[in-house]
Image (tube, rainbow, N blue to C red):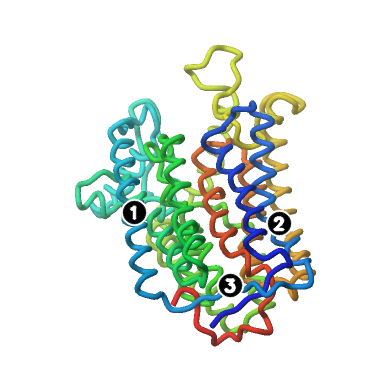
Amino acid sequence: MLQLNIGPLGFRRHQAVMLGLFIVELGFYTVYANRLGPYLSASLFFVSSLGIGLYPLWCARQAPYSPDRLQFRQVTVPRLLVGQVLFGLGAVVLAVKQLAIIRAFPLDYHLSDVIPSVDQFVTRFLQGEKVYGRDIAYPEYSIIPNYLPFQWLPMTFSKWAQIDLRWSALLMCVTGIVAYEWAVLKANVRWGPLLGWLALPLVALGLMMQHRPDVFGYTVEPMVMGYYLLLGCSLMSRSIGFRAVALLLCGLSRFSLLLWVPLYLLILFCEEPRARTWRLLAYCVVGVLLVYIIPFMSQNWTAPFRAMQAYETAALGEWAGQAWQEPGAKPFQLFQGYGFAAFFHDFGGGALLDRLHSLQRTHLWLSLAAVVAMGVLFFRYRRRIDSRYFALISLKVYFAFFYNFIQVPYGYLFIVPVMLSVVVIFFLPFARSASTEVPLDQPEIHG
């Protein structure tokens, strides 16, 4: 049975602190989004997000250690039944909300071309066409086929079943929640906290659907959020297959994971047998070849590079403001209370393009600096914190910089780092190293 020590106040109090930070983070994404203006709202969101990633390091420094322990065991029948009932009720509520959102947000490329573009990807795939062979054309413009495979492949089921594609996005989101809830059900916690941990992602998702329905009506980002819930849970597992699948789902949906992967490999090479790390790396390389490069990227080798150029053109358009805005109005997407693009827009020097380039450089260097800094901290804390949990919080810290300094802070992007916080908080007891207590052949969290 897996048993882990944590800090002197007990993990419940430490988790309460992190839950407070999460309330701020979730609140400024949903209920209080932009309530304090774009500068202060974005700053508080960033501080709370970064705090959730860094607070476990403070916990790991505390001594002496309390007798509190978190244990994982086989799921008992009563717990399983309670989990199924609670999850079932939550799923019904979420399905009702999603149905209302689908009815309220018609698929019109004039409003958002994300789902219409995904539909074209899926249609080409099911009809045997080259998915990336030509641009996606609309009457007024065309876009480069730059969506990675796992942004549209799961939608093939909805297209085949002739149901709205957005149901597939919600299904993948729920799949990630199921993985998290399975870990919660295996945790040896009392009934009160157990119910709270089971309900937490459902409540958070409900708030997102209530206050950001556009995310669920116009984008596939809920699906990506589900991928990252799977990744967060997989990082706490020693299963090579589970981790490889989660990494592939995330890496082949968005490139945002790319800069963090070398740090994760470093942690694995230092803490796990080299053969297991090489096997994980081999699975990922083979997966990228089989899922993306050979069947799809080979159809149009120039598409990814053209897409990178198109991103800057699109970003400059967003920085100039929407066509429907009054001349001189603040660019809509930059001033919604997310990210620091508004600071660079208003206080950066030079022309508009110069300010955009300044943010792009800052984004890159701060993201790299976050990875390097967490690498240095890993060697400092590697004997005091479980390496699997360190990988998880390093991802959270990296995302705090990557998302908040992105060149166009579209609101839908931020559901990924916000929901990842739920996994980070639940697994806080792993802040105390278990390297002398848990051999590699121990039963795993995820079976």
Element on which disc 2 rests: helix
* Crowd around label 1: few <14 · some 14–19 · many ≥20 (10 Å): some
Residue 34 picture location, percent across and down: 59, 29
Q: Is residue 332 above or below residue 213?
A: above
Q: Mark 1: which amino acid? A: Leu
* Crowd around label 3: few <14 · some 14–19 · many ≥20 (10 Å): some
Q: Is residue 1 above or below residue 156?
A: below
The residue closer to the viewer here, 58 or 230, is: 58
Which residue is situated farthest in the top direction here?
Answer: 327
- Disc number for residue 55: 2
The residue closer to the viewer here, 278 or 385, is: 385
The residue sitting at 53% across, 83% down in the picture is 1
Give the number of the mark in front: 3 or 1: 3
Element on which disc 3 rests: strand
State the separation of the CA atoms marked 2 and 1: 32 Å
Quadrant of the rendering where the C terminus is positioned: bottom left
Residue 125 picture location, percent across and down: 29, 53
Q: Which residue is mark 1?
A: 171
Q: Tell which circle, 2 or 1, labels the residue nearer the N-terminal end.
A: 2
The residue sitting at 37% across, 27% down in the picture is 110
The residue closer to the viewer here, 340 or 44, is: 44
Q: Quadrant of residue 67?
A: bottom right
Q: Mark 2: which amino acid? A: Tyr
State the separation of the CA atoms marked 3 and 1: 30 Å
Q: Which residue is mark 3?
A: 70
**Residue 87 visible in the picture:** yes
Q: Mark 3: which amino acid? A: Leu
Q: Is residue 35 above or below residue 412?
A: above
**Image side of residue 367 versus residue 82, left or right:** right
